[in-house]
Image (cartoon, rainbow, N blue to C red):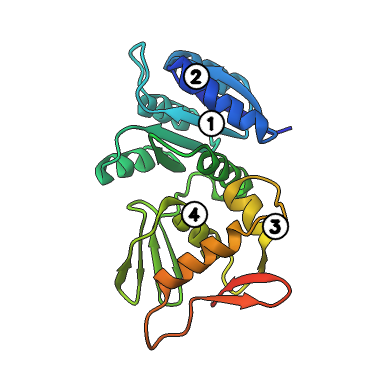
Amino acid sequence: MTDILVVEDDARTAREIIAALVDHGLRTAHAATGIEALQKARATNYDAIILDRMLPGGLEGLEVLAALRGNGVTTPVLILSALSAVTDRVRGLRAGGDDYLTKPFDFLELTARVDALIRRPSAGVGRQEVELLVGDLHMDLITRSVRRVGRPIDLLPREYMLLKHFMHNPGRALTRAMIFEQVWGYHYDERTNVIDVHVAKLRRKLDIEGLPSAIETVRGEGYRLAA
């Protein structure tokens, strides 16, 4: 069973996060203060930690994170914060965070990001990935910006997560079920065309006249990002 520590002082937000994680098949523990979070994280080997940046009790989120990393705790940490400026995200990642999600957020995106943290090999923990490069596509994971041949591409949050999944699997044919379960965080229902709709929208944004399509349709399988 996968164990997630949720560090969030707002009771309502904590309940909603925990409910989303439990529905996703994850087991959770909760801490409402930085001190409680440190105690639990040191006592239990969690698979991931969701850490609110603004915490009461004199020990805020980044201080908790610094203390954990200083004590050799390498558990992947997803930072939650209402602070959305690039400098804030950079500070969180440089403090030892593995990902940074701004409030308000979509719970499907939250579970997808937790899944991504859990899947990371242990050898990669502590080395923050800051960009993805596939062919003429560039994704900055800190600023969450995307460019193709240097041209900025404006993506919605779900489109960004979809492209990020493709860029983690360049040249690989991904089935609709694989995409749905990894990006949306739920089991795929063959009756829905949500994957085809989102891929079509993403493809239109990425396609540039004179260049081959970035996303290819693989007949009988799904879709593939041209490597």
Regarding mark 4 in the picture, which secondary structure is present there? helix
Name the residue beneath numbered marker 1. Answer: 49
Label 3: how many Cα within 10 Å (few below 14, some 14–19, many 20+)? some
Q: Nearer the viewer, mark 3 or mark 2?
A: 3
First in sequence: mark 3 vs mark 1: 1
Mark 3 vs mark 4: in front: 3
Q: Is residue 18 left or right of residue 61?
A: right
**Secondary structure under badge 2?**
helix
The quadrant in which residue 152 appears is bottom left
Task: Mark 3 or mark 4: name the one nearer the start of the chain.
Answer: 4
Q: Which mark is residue 37?
A: 2
> Relative to residue 210, is residue 178 depicted above or below?
above
Q: Residue at x 36, y 17 (%)?
A: 59
Q: Position of residue 176 (x, y in %)?
A: 67, 61
Q: Amino acid at mark 4?
A: Met
- Which residue is outermost to the top? 57
Q: Secondary structure at mark 1?
A: strand
Distance, label 1 to label 2, CA atoms, is: 9 Å
Q: Are marks 1 and 2 in contact (CB under 8 Å)?
A: yes
Point out the tag, 2 or 4, that comes first from the N-terminus: 2
Which numbered mark, 2 or 4, is in the foreground of this view? 4
Residue occupied by mark 4: 161
Q: Is residue 46 visible?
A: no
Amino acid at the residue labelled 1: Ile
> Amino acid under label 3?
Ala
Q: Residue at x 37, y 19 (%)?
A: 55
* Sequence-first disc among 3 and 2: 2
The alpha-carbon separation of the residues under discs 4 and 1 comes to 20 Å
